[in-house]
Image (cartoon, grey):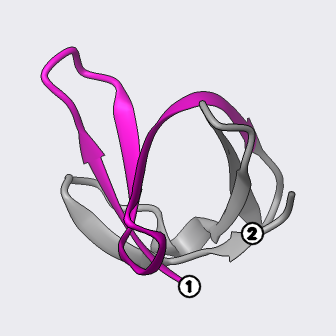
Amino acid sequence: MKVMLRQNAAGHLVVYVAKKDLEEEVVKEVETETEKIYTLANGWELAIASEEIPAAFPKTVEARRVA
């Protein structure tokens, strides 16, 4: 699914999922060799491939829901 990553006014990473009209703050990040797993405030876990992680925000990337 396509998600948009951006930083809010407080400097925290926020994920917006347009298909679900969902915007949640990232509360935890875990990095593996091939991807980064973001845990959102609502409990969702989204995996994003390491090569898609943007250097600057906002950026739309492809993610998959882990949990």
The secondary structure that most of the magenta stretch takes on is strand
The residue closer to the viewer here, 19 or 14, is 19
Characterize the local packing of mark 2: few (<14), some (14-19) or many (20 or more) Cα atoms within 10 angstroms. few
In the image, residue 11 above or below residue 65: above
User: Is residue 11 shown left or right of residue 63?
Assistant: left
In the image, residue 8 above or below residue 6: above
Is 2 within the magenta?
yes
> Where does residue 21 sit, x and y in percent of width and height?
38, 66
> Which range of residues does the magenta coloring cover?
1-30
Numbered disc 1: secondary structure: loop
Numbered disc 2: secondary structure: strand
- Residue annotated with mark 1: 1
Where residue 47 is drawn, which disc sits there?
Answer: none
Q: Quadrant of the N terminus?
A: bottom right
The residue closer to the viewer here, 46 or 54, is 46
User: Is residue 61 shown left or right of residue 51?
Assistant: left
Mark 1 residue type: Met
Q: CA distance from mark 1 to mark 2?
A: 8 Å
- Residue annotated with mark 2: 65
